[in-house]
Image (cartoon, helix red, strand yellow):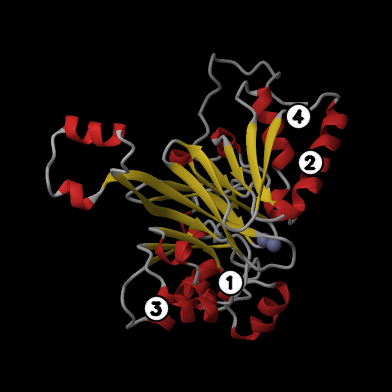
């Protein structure tokens, strides 16, 4: 066994999400992860209790906002699953920065029971800033739908956590010609006439693209049809140590054993695991899961979000590899340090 493996077998090993710290390097923060799927990119950062923000730039959304990593500002919609600080701390900053950067006001969807508290928090920051923070808040309940853009719907599903919470599924909604009409290959003017007479010539086809659980326990979440059938499922799995099942129960989180039990029912193409505990070395967690399911059917493909984090590092006392050798424009005039 090589030295790396010895460390990775130990869940108590110092956490190093950026993939190696043997030279005393420090990760550039935040070490955002990026996963390219056949449909869109998934960008973000997620460590339990610290920060979770997961963005899908092509769909214009960020699930939870963490401490508001810079790239997530570009998404017009923030889908907040619950109020815990590691998921919501950057919300006021997100809204304020969007105004500062000349973007349209951000829209925040949140569980209905926390809407008043979210409003009060945004208003309090507005008083501190001396001006109201432009935003739109959409309280959501389980089953509620909201149109993000034509044909792209978000639908909330129930989750179970220590505070009011919701998960979200993004749905590609299309109007398709009724199959009985499609087989007849009727000309366009005939179909238009039928429509003009008030006949329903289409049906609605919903394709769940991606589901995001936020923090939750198992049964209320992963067995929901939207969640099981989404092409991509982004699920929390906080605990992996066999001794941490009670922690998972008390904190209302998923343990890897819950996930393993749910896997046979999942129809997703890709499962992305987020919110791994700070105590857990992510490579060890990944090996633990892969070992437990070896020999099982290959679907869904499983990836750990933070295993895809960028690996840029700075070595204390040295310039980072990517720093320019010389300052642009020649001599250092001594004015480049920030106050
Ligand atoms: Zn959390
Ligand atoms: Zn939480």
Image quadrant where residue 299 sits:
bottom left
Q: Earlier in the sequence, mark 4 or mark 1?
A: 4
| Comparing labels 3 and 2, the label whose residue is closer to the camera | 2
Which badge, 3 or 2, is on the more N-terminal residue?
A: 2
Camera sees residue 252: yes
Circles 4 and 1: CB atoms closer than 8 Å: no
Q: Is residue 62 above or below residue 235?
A: above
Q: State the residue at coordinates (41%, 55%).
A: 208
Residue at label 1? 220
The answer to whether the residues at label 1 and label 3 have Cβ atoms under 8 Å apart is: no
Residue that mark 4 sits on = 133
Rate crowding at label 4 as few (under 14), some (14 to 19) or many (20 or more) other CA atoms within 10 Å.
many
- Whether residues under marks 4 and 3 lie with C-beta atoms below 8 angstroms apart, the answer is no
**Is the N terminus in the top left, top right, bottom left or bottom right quadrant?**
bottom left
N-term-proximal mark, 4 vs 2: 2
Label placed on residue 119 = 2
Residue 298: x %, y % from top left:
31, 73
Q: As rendered, which of 129 and 226 lies closer to the eye?
A: 226
10 Å crowding of disc 1: few (<14), some (14-19), many (20+): few
Mark 1 and mark 2 residues within 8 Å of each other at the beta carbon: no
């Amino acid at each position: 066994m090589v030295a790396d493996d010895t460390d990775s077998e130990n869940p108590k090993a110092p956490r190093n999400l950026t993939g190696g710290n043997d030279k005393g390097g420090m990760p550039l923060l935040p070490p955002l992860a990026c996963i390219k799927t056949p449909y869109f990119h998934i960008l973000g950062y997620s460590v339990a209790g610290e920060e979770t923000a997961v963005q899908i730039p092509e769909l214009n959304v960020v699930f939870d906002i963490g401490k508001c990593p810079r790239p997530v500002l570009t998404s017009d919609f923030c889908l907040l699953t619950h109020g815990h600080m590691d998921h919501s701390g950057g919300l006021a900053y997100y809204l304020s920065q969007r105004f500062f950067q000349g973007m349209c006001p951000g829209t925040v969807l949140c569980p209905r029971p926390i809407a008043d508290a979210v409003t009060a928090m945004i208003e309090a920051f507005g008083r501190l800033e001396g001006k109201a923070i432009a935003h739109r808040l959409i309280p959501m309940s389980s089953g509620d739908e909201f149109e993000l853009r034509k044909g792209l719907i978000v639908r909330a599903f129930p989750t179970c956590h220590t505070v009011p919470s919701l998960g979200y599924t993004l749905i590609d909604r299309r109007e398709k010609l009724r199959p009985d009409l499609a087989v007849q290959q009727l000309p366009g003017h005939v179909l238009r006439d039928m429509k003009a007479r008030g006949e329903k010539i289409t049906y609605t086809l919903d394709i769940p693209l991606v589901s995001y659980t936020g923090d939750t326990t198992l049964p209320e979440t992963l067995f929901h049809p939207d969640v099981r059938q989404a092409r991509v499922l982004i699920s929390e799995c906080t605990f992996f140590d066999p001794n941490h099942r009670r922690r998972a129960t008390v904190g209302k989180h998923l343990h890897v054993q819950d996930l393993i039990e749910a896997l046979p029912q999942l129809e997703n193409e890709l499962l992305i695991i987020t919110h791994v505990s700070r105590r857990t070395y992510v490579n060890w967690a990944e090996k633990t899961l892969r070992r437990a399911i070896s020999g099982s059917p290959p679907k869904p493909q499983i990836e750990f979000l933070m295993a895809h984090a960028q690996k840029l590092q700075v070595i204390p006392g040295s310039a980072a590899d990517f720093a320019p050798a010389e300052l642009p424009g020649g001599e250092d005039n001594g004015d480049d340090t920030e106050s």
